[in-house]
Each structure stands twice: as C-alpha cells, then as structure tokens.
Amino acid sequence: MSYVRLNRRATLGLLAAMALAPVHAAGQPGVAAPVVKVPKPAPMDLCPVCGMVVSKYPNWVATVLWKNGQTHHFDGAKDMFKFLHNLAKYA
C-alpha cells in the first residue's frame, strides 16, 4: 500500500472542499439534513463537568442537544468529550 504525503496547501484545500460539500441525510441521497437551532447558554449556566460559568467563554462553548430537547453546555470541547465518555458519572 502506498501513501501520498500532502503538503499544508493541499491539506487545507482538501479540508475546505470537504467543508463546502453538501450534507445529506443518512440513506437519502440528494436530501439535505435538517437545520438544527442550538440554544445559547444562559448567563449563569454551569459546565456539568468542571462547574465553570459557560457564558464567559462564548468562543469555546460546546453544546450537546438531546433528542428530547434537553441541552448541556460546556466551557470547551474537552469537557464535552469527558461528559460523553462517562455519562454515568456526570448525567
């Protein structure tokens, strides 16, 4: 098996093409996935992992939106992944 080594420009071009590619719903070619509105955290929402106030860091907010409409906001992606990998501990 041979591998192709991409330089920085080729990698960024590939990532840009992937980002601009249309998103399709699973199993339905040609049908766009529905747009989901993710609510913003309230001024005093706390991260369920570390307890920090989430609204202080708007550039880093990560949100999990469950099927039942419940949301969990996190002050960063690291805490969101900790939460998702150990639901029994945090939920």
Image (cartoon, grey):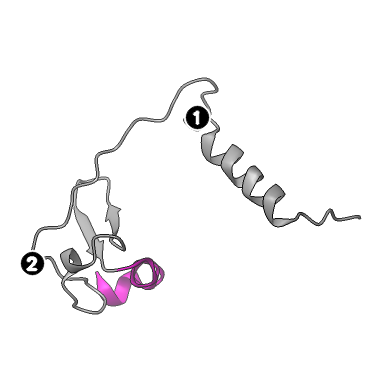
In the visual, does 9 lie left or right of 64?
Answer: right
Q: Residue at x 15, y 72 (%)?
A: 53
> Relative to residue 89, is residue 34 depicted above or below?
above
Q: Is 90 part of what is drawn in magenta?
A: yes
Q: Residue at x 64, y 44 (%)?
A: 13
Q: Residue at x 8, y 62 (%)?
A: 43
Farthest residue, direction top: 30
SS for callout 1: loop
Decide whether the magenta segment is chiefly helix, strand or loop: helix
Q: Is 65 part of what is drawn in magenta?
A: no
Residue 9 on image: x %, y %: 68, 50
> Relative to residue 64, is residue 52 depicted above or below?
below
Crowd rating for badge 1 (residues with CA inside 10 Å; few <14, some 14–19, many 20+): few
Crowd rating for badge 2 (residues with CA inside 10 Å; few <14, some 14–19, many 20+): few
> Relative to residue 48, is residue 42 depicted above or below?
above
Residue 22 on image: x %, y %: 51, 29
Residue 60 on image: x %, y %: 31, 63
Amino acid carrying mark 2 in the image = Met
Q: Earlier in the sequence, mark 2 or mark 1?
A: 1
In the visual, does 66 lie left or right of 86?
Answer: left
Q: Residue at x 76, y 54 (%)?
A: 6
Q: Which residue was labeled with disc 2?
A: 44
In the visual, does 45 lie left or right of 33?
Answer: left
In the visual, does 47 lie left or right of 14?
Answer: left
Quarter of the figure with the C terminus: bottom left
- Separation of disc 2 and disc 1 at Cα? 36 Å
Q: Which residue was labeled with disc 1?
A: 24
Q: Residue 32 is drawn in which quadrant?
A: top left
Q: Nearer the viewer, residue 62 or 7?
A: 7
The circle on residue 3 is none
Amino acid carrying mark 1 in the image = His
Q: Tell me where the magenta segment starts and ends, as one range.
A: 76-91
